[in-house]
Image: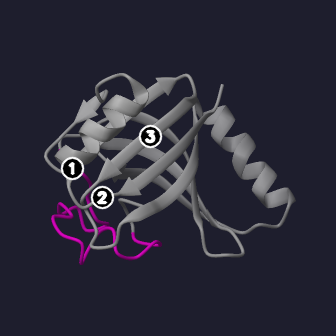
């Protein structure tokens, strides 16, 4: 079963963790110095926040697939509807390794379809394999190789 994904860029992580933990009545499932994530079942959502960009607000939306078949189904729907998009297999982003497919709606809202295969110890890595330690390589461009 797929799960809605929402990623919000925030200014103050600890204030935001306190707010969203109260709203969801639970602590984050994952918490790092620059990132937190709640894997909720009611509502079924992967809700993440981070301080990786200067801008605040909704960073991107998405659909998390539970397996490669669900991701392929989402990609096939996008292809059938001629929505375009970019595949990003083996992406290292948000402390996870995932296969991804990126779309952009007519307003410029970025959508990520993804299947996570495991955890990694860093927020993300760029295409050259170096950790994306700042917003100049990760997070300011919605089409960057990670951290969307």
* SS state under label 1: helix
Q: Which residue is mark 2?
A: 10
* SS state under label 2: loop
Side of 48 where 75 appears, left or right: right
Please report the residue visible at 34 percent of the width from the left and 30 percent of the height from the top: 22
- Position of the N terminus by quadrant: top right
Picture quadrant of residue 66: top right
Question: In front of the other: label 2 or label 3?
Answer: 2
Q: Are marks 3 and 1 in contact (CB under 8 Å)?
A: no
Of the two numbered discs 3 and 1 on the same chain, state the one appearing first in sequence: 1
Please report the residue visible at 36 percent of the width from the left and 61 percent of the height from the top: 146
Q: Is residue 118 visible?
A: no
Q: In 3D space, how far apart are the residues under numbered discs 3 and 1 (Cα atoms)? A: 14 Å
- Across and down, in percent, residue 139 comes to 33, 68
Based on the picture, tell me whether residue 132 belongs to the magenta stretch.
yes
Region of the chain picked out in magenta, as a range: 122-144
Mark 2 surroundings within 10 Å by alpha-carbon count, few (fewer than 14), some (14 through 19), many (20 or more): many
Q: Which mark is residue 37?
A: none
Q: Which residue is mark 1?
A: 13
- Across and down, in percent, residue 82 comes to 82, 67
Q: Which residue is mark 3?
A: 47
* SS state under label 3: strand
Q: Are marks 2 and 1 in contact (CB under 8 Å)?
A: yes
Please report the residue visible at 40 percent of the width from the left and 71 percent of the height from the top: 144
Q: Nearer the viewer, residue 128 or 9?
A: 9
Side of 55 where 101 appears, left or right: right
Please report the residue visible at 58 percent of the width from the left and 30 percent of the height from the top: 67
Side of 88 where 4 appears, left or right: right
Q: Nearer the viewer, residue 69 or 103?
A: 103
Q: Is residue 45 visible?
A: yes
Residue 63 lies, with reference to residue 41, above or below; the image says below
């Amino acid at each position: 079963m797929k799960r809605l994904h929402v990623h919000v860029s925030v200014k103050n992580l600890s204030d935001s963790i306190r707010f969203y933990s109260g709203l969801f009545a639970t602590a984050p499932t994952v918490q790092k110095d620059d990132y937190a994530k709640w894997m909720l079942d009611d509502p079924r959502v992967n809700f993440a926040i981070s301080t990786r960009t200067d801008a605040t607000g909704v960073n991107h939306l998405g659909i998390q697939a539970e397996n490669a078949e669900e991701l392929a189904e989402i990609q096939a729907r996008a292809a059938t509807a001629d929505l375009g998009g970019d595949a990003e297999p083996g992406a290292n982003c948000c402390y996870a390794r995932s296969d991804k497919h990126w779309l952009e709606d007519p307003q410029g809202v970025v959508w990520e379809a993804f299947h996570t295969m495991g955890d990694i110890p860093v927020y993300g890595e760029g295409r050259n394999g170096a950790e994306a330690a700042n917003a100049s390589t990760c997070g300011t461009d919605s089409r960057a190789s990670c951290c969307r």
